[in-house]
């Protein structure tokens, strides 16, 4: 089967051509999936804003950063400068080799007729996102990241052209329901509230971790380990909710709770951590792993499911009843089997969040 050809679209979201990687197999952890049963004030508030990695990314949570584009630009993203004390191992250039796949006619035949007829997969991404999920490359023009790479190889597998369209974290639900996108890749977690309006195809686990100074003589991973510690966390986020619940557990047991610190910017948080004014910083694993890979003075500790005390998964998000969730999940399964999905996860240091399989999640079958 020959590689599926992609023709550039007439918009300002820059892409570049490259040779396809040869798929390889990687090992993955088995994960159980349930809905994140959290009372949320807005449909757009699930995978909480992640930090802008030092030297790269922007200050949002979700997908492709950037500005402009005929796909409806709602926001912009700061470009990576390739920074970090150690320079890291992730290629953040705008000329990185694209990971590609090939079309599967049997899976493509599952597409809703209206999508098959257009021949295009319109992918909505968050325009104020953070590395490594999606962000502006070093050239300040090209949009790269794990969310974009996964959506692109799914389009390949479905035999569709890939079209990147920008939105914001607050606006993606309305724009998706209005039909401006076929799917949204914006670090969106599955929960009961969203299942009332959207269908999903899971593609990544959702973890939180602690960023600490290199060589710390303690280990942070649960309520017990936080007693008496000073922890930085972004306000009004899911991770703050977890820490607040853990503090309640500590106080109920007669133990000293953690002191929670809020900072006005990610740069201030990292400065406080480096100076020893806080013991750790709890935030999404994906962005913290990117920071740790580019800084010799920080490391990660612990891994907490973002749906604690339940579990959740990050998923491609569709309008309910669109008919896209099943073929999308089938394409992801094929990509997992052939190893292309694993290449994407390895490239962005997200192998710990790789899934062994995808499936469709709907209100009837959460």
Image (cartoon, grey):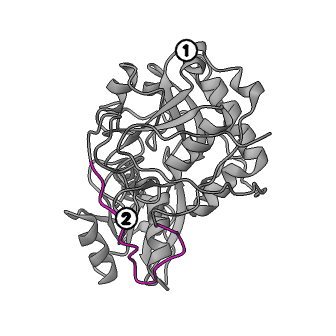
Q: Residue furthest left?
A: 264
Residue 114 is tagged as: 1
Q: Residue at x 53, y 17 (%)?
A: 322
Can the viewer see residue 257? no
In the drawing, does residue 130 fall left or right of residue 350? left
Question: In the image, is residue 180 part of the stretch drawn in magenta?
Answer: no
Eyeballing the image, is 204 above or below 181? below
Whether 77 is drawn above or below 5: the answer is below
The answer to whether any part of residue 267 appears in the image is yes
Which residue is at a point 58% across and 48% down the rendered structure image?
Answer: 205
Q: Residues within 10 Å of mark 1 (few under 14, many from 20)?
A: few
Q: Residue at x 29, y 59 (%)?
A: 78
Closer to the camera, 281 or 200?
200
Location of residue 164 (image quadrant): top left
Q: Secondary structure at mark 2?
A: loop
The percent coordinates of residue 234 (x first, y second) are 29, 57
Magenta segment, which residues? Answer: 76-92
Q: Position of residue 27 (x, y in %)?
A: 76, 57
162 relative to 146, above or below: above
Q: Eyeballing the image, is 30 above or below 51?
A: above
Residue indicated by mark 2 = 139
The one nearer the camera, 255 or 122, is 122
Of the 4 image quadrants, the one containing the N terminus is: top right
The image quadrant of residue 212 is bottom left
Count all numbered tags in the image, as a single digit: 2
Crowdedness near tag 2: few (<14), some (14–19) or many (≥20) residues, C-alpha within 10 Å? some
> Viewer-proximal residue, 340 or 245?
340
> What separation in Å lies between label 2 and label 1 (alpha carbons)?
36 Å
Q: Is 87 colored magenta in this rendering?
A: yes
Q: Residue at x 30, y 54 (%)?
A: 77
Disc 1 element: helix
């Amino acid at each position: 089967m020959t590689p599926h050809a992609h023709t550039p679209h007439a918009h300002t979201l820059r892409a570049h051509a490259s040779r396809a990687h040869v798929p390889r197999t990687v090992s993955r952890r088995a994960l159980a999936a349930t809905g994140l049963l959290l009372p949320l004030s807005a449909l757009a508030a699930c995978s909480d804003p992640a930090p802008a990695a030092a030297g790269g990314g922007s200050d949002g949570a979700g997908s492709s950063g950037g500005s402009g584009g005929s796909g409806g630009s709602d926001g912009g993203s700061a470009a990576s400068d390739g920074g970090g004390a150690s320079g890291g191992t992730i290629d953040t250039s705008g000329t990185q080799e694209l990971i590609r796949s090939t079309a599967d006619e049997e899976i493509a035949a599952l597409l809703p007729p209206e999508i098959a007829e257009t021949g295009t997969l319109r992918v909505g991404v968050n325009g104020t996102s953070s590395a490594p999920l999606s962000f502006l490359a070093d050239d300040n023009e090209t949009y790269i990241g794990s969310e974009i790479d996964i959506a692109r190889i799914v389009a390949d597998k479905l035999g569709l052209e890939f079209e990147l369209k920008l939105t914001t974290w607050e606006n993606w639900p309305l724009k998706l329901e209005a039909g401006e996108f076929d799917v949204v890749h914006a670090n969106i977690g599955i929960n009961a509230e969203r299942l009332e309006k959207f269908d999903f195809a899971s593609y990544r686990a959702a973890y939180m971790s602690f960023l600490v100074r290199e060589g710390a003589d303690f280990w942070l991973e649960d309520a017990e380990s936080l007693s008496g510690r000073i922890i930085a966390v972004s306000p009004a986020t899911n991770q703050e909710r977890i820490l607040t619940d853990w503090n309640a557990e500590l106080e109920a047991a007669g133990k000293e709770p953690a002191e929670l610190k809020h900072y006005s910017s990610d740069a201030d948080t990292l400065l406080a951590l480096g100076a020893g004014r806080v013991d750790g910083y709890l935030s999404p694993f994906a962005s913290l792993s990117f920071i740790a890979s580019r800084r010799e003075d920080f490391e990660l500790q612990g891994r907490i499911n973002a749906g604690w005390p339940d579990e959740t998964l990050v998923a491609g998000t569709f309008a309910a009843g669109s008919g896209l969730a099943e073929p999308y999940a089938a394409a992801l399964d094929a990509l997992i089997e052939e190893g292309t999905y694993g290449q994407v996860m390895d490239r962005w240091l997200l192998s710990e969040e790789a899934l062994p399989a995808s499936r469709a999640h709907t209100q009837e079958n959460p």
